[in-house]
């Protein structure tokens, strides 16, 4: 019996000691590597963790505008980007940045190619997706850490579990830009109330046992998420909605800074607005957003279907909904095909058009040729597409939640700059109201929309991100 006890405690000690030894040797390796780097080159190194840097979405605009700001303020700092876009060369990536965002960067950005990006892709984890992707990000983070050791590490895609690696093991100064919390109190509440939603299937919602198990899983994950977030020296969030959720989860209000994402407001505001729909021709409705499930393109199609019942046939024939967005991979292209099939099912194929991965000039042209904009994502963290539509002079109809409700759209009479809606019927009524109102009333809202977006400009973003990061750079430069 005594022998069994000794064996048990021996195994327990071994289980505890091995991880400690691994972490110790990893830290020692990183310290030695940093000394070697400084002997070879004493330049300050900053690296952005953005595995999908070539995707062409709003998160990528944040990345490239941040890099441009750093290059202009700190020309001697070396900038690197961790990317999993293996088939795209550095020149191809930078050319796409110019083509998609109209952003020109210095060519001396170093791209660190990661081969384990598949570990963070959602289809790999049909169950326990949040935990699977987060553990996958740690695997990808280890690859990044050993491929390139920076002085300042910035997670710009929301992979917060990597902060621990670079802070504790890599001894980096860390920062993060949070577009959307990995888990929120709202998600936990839906499981508690057993409501069916995109992150809570009807099978789980109907079962008390499965709901209880999922609630425990979410609470444990929420604690892990908060623990990893505590390793960020500076936290940047893109909206007041995101800020509230991060502060409630991470309890980090003193180190959290709201930096609205950069929107191309200047060039859009300087161009003439589209002629009013009263002048005849198409009644074009533009929807800008990446082709992803959370953008809820089906809701927008259902809204157009319901709109048919609120307009005369003659007027409805003029309605044209144009979807504009980027596709990252095959799953996104499948989503587009599904939406095209839904159009046919609803007999809307003559009223809907899909545009994929369009260049910046074409996007701008589409925005400036429409009077109405549409956006349907529930709890959209911010809404760059919404702001750019408003800068172009569109009347936006967006979801009554998240960033659009908290930061962007005002519905008070006298200061209205857009509309908010929650379901297909409310969307349809808002669209019908816009189409039926007088040209003078439409023009008043369009002008109000344009005048409300200056605080979301690229210049304001770059000023905000530099104001937030300057203390980190000053501290590291002082230590050099």
Image (spheres, grey):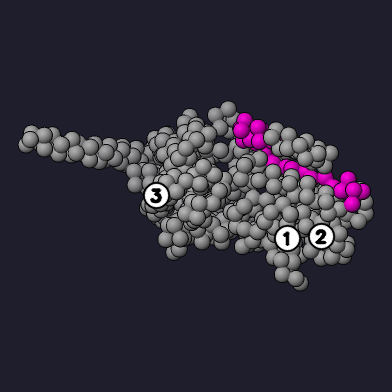
Q: Residue at x 56, y 32 (%)?
A: 85
Q: Earlier in the sequence, mark 1 or mark 3?
A: 3
- Residue 383, horizontal then vertical, whole percent: 64, 53
Examine the rendering and report whether any part of residue 436 can be seen.
Answer: yes
Of 467 and 357, nearer the camera is 357
Give the number of the disc on residue 433.
2
Furthest-bottom residue in this view: 414
How far apart, in angstroms, are the residues tagged by discs 2 and 1? 10 Å
Looking at marks 3 and 2 on the same chain, the residue that comes earlier in the sequence is marked by 3
Q: Which residue bears the numbered disc 1?
A: 419
Q: Which residues are magenta?
A: 312-336
115 vs 411, left or right, is left
| Position in image of residue 377 (x %, y %) | 64, 50
* Local SS, label 1: strand
Dot 3: element: helix
Q: Position of residue 125 (x, y in %)?
A: 48, 35
Where is mark 3, residue-wise?
216
Nearer the N terminus, badge 2 or badge 1?
A: 1
Q: Quadrant of residue 107?
A: top right
Asked if residue 242 lies left or right of residue 287, the reply is left
The span from disc 1 to disc 3 (Cα, nearest Å) is 38 Å
List the single residue furthest toward the left.
Answer: 2
Residue 19 placement (x, y as % from top left): 27, 38
Q: Alpha-carbon neighbours of circle 2 within 10 Å: few (<14), some, or many (≥20)?
A: some
Q: CA distance from mark 3 to mark 2?
A: 45 Å
Q: Residue at x 54, y 57 (%)?
A: 242
């Amino acid at each position: 019996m005594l022998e069994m006890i000794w064996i048990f405690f021996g195994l327990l000690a071994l289980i505890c000691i091995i991880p400690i030894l691994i972490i110790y040797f990893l830290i020692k390796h990183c310290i030695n590597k940093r000394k070697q780097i400084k002997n070879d080159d004493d330049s300050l190194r900053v690296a952005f963790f953005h595995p999908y840097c070539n995707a062409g979405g709003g998160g990528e605009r944040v990345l490239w505008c941040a890099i441009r700001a750093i290059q202009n303020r700190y020309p001697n700092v070396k900038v690197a980007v961790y990317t999993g876009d293996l088939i795209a060369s550095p020149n191809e990536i930078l050319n796409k940045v110019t083509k998609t965002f109209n952003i020109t960067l210095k060519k001396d950005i170093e791209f660190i190619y990661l081969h384990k990006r598949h570990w963070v892709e959602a289809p790999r984890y049909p169950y326990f997706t949040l935990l699977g992707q987060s553990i996958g990000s740690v695997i990808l983070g280890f690859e990044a850490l050993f491929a390139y050791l920076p002085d300042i590490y910035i997670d710009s895609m929301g992979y917060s579990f990597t902060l621990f690696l670079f802070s504790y093991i890599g001894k980096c100064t860390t920062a993060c830009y949070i577009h959307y919390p990995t888990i929120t109190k709202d998600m936990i509440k839906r499981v508690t109330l057993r409501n069916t939603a995109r992150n809570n299937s009807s099978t789980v919602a109907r079962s008390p046992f499965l709901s209880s198990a999922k609630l425990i899983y979410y609470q444990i994950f929420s604690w892990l998420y908060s623990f990893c977030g505590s390793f960020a020296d500076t936290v940047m969030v893109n909206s007041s909605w995101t800020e509230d959720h991060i502060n409630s989860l991470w309890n980090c209000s003193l180190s959290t800074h709201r930096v609205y994402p950069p929107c191309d407001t200047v060039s859009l505001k300087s161009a003439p607005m589209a002629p009013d729909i009263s002048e005849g021709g198409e009644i074009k409705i533009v929807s800008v957003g990446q082709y992803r499930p959370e953008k809820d393109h089906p809701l927008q199609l259902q809204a157009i279907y319901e709109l048919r019942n609120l307009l005369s046939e003659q007027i409805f024939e003029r309605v044209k909904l144009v979807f504009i967005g980027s596709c990252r991979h095959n799953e996104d292209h499948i989503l587009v095909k599904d939406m095209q099939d839904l159009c046919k099912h609803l007999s809307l194929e003559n009223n809907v058009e899909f545009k994929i991965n369009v260049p910046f000039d074409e996007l701008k042209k589409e925005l400036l040729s429409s009077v109405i904009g549409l956006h349907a994502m529930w709890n959209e963290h911010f809404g760059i597409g919404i702001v750019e539509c408003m800068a172009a002079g569109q009347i936006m109809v967006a979801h009554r939640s998240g960033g659009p409700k908290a930061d962007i759209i005002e519905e008070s009479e006298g200061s209205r700059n857009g509309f908010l809606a929650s379901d297909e019927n409310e969307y349809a009524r808002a669209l019908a109201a816009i189409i039926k109102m007088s040209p003078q009333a439409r023009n008043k809202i369009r002008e109000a929309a344009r005048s409300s977006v200056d605080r979301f400009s690229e210049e304001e973003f770059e000023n905000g991100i530099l104001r937030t990061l300057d203390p980190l750079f000053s501290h590291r430069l002082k230590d050099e």
